[in-house]
Amino acid sequence: MLELRPSCEHCNKLLPPASPEARICSFECTFCATCASEVLDNVCPNCGGGFAPRPVRPVTDWKGGNHLARHPAVTAVKHRPVDAAAQAALVAAVGGLPPERR
């Protein structure tokens, strides 16, 4: 189950569970849309993968108890600002490949 991390790992912008601005990689590294596209060039600094919009967990119990109150978002912040030089090297190495081929 997704953790729904509370903020962007780079800029620490708040990303509540319903935020359409949250972007995640397949390891659930979490960044805001601005950082994912403008700072990271759609290359996760932690794994080299690409980003996709994070799904929103329903607030309402529409079926089977699968809702935010029963499965809340984590509260622990992972603030790990990206090293610009390391990110530039990673983007140079893999940024030309589409995420599904990295």
Image (spheres, helix red, strand yellow):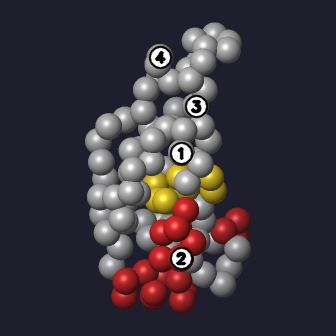
Q: Nearer the viewer, mark 4 or mark 1?
A: 1
Task: Answer above or below: position of 91 versus 77.
Answer: below
Disc 3 secondary structure class:
loop
Quarter of the rendering occupied by the C terminus: bottom right
Q: Which of disc 1 and disc 2 is earlier in sequence?
A: 1
The image quadrant of residue 13 is bottom left
The picture places residue 52, in percent across and down from the top left corner, at: 63, 56
**Residue under numbered circle 4:** 70
**Residue under numbered circle 1:** 19
Amino acid type of the residue that numbered disc 4 sits on in the rendered structure = Arg
User: Alpha-carbon distance for marks 2 and 4?
Assistant: 35 Å
Task: Answer above or below: position of 40 versus 68.
Answer: below
Amino acid type of the residue that numbered disc 2 sits on in the rendered structure = Glu
The image quadrant of residue 12 is bottom left
Q: Which of disc 3 and disc 2 is earlier in sequence?
A: 2
**Residue under numbered circle 3:** 57
Q: Is residue 57 visible?
A: yes
User: Alpha-carbon distance for marks 2 and 3?
Assistant: 26 Å
Task: Answer above or below: position of 52 versus 47.
Answer: above
- Please give the name of the residue rendered at 55% of the width and 54% of the height, measured from the top-left corner: 21
User: Alpha-carbon distance for marks 4 and 3?
Assistant: 11 Å
Amino acid type of the residue that numbered disc 1 sits on in the rendered structure = Ser
Q: Name the disc covering residue 38, or none.
A: 2
Q: Residues within 10 Å of mark 2 (few under 14, many from 20)?
A: few
Q: Which of disc 4 and disc 2 is earlier in sequence?
A: 2
Q: Which of disc 1 and disc 4 is earlier in sequence?
A: 1
**Circles 4, 1 touching at the beta carbon (< 8 Å):** no
The picture places residue 24, in percent across and down from the top left corner, at: 54, 54
Q: Which of 22 and 45 is in front in this view?
A: 22
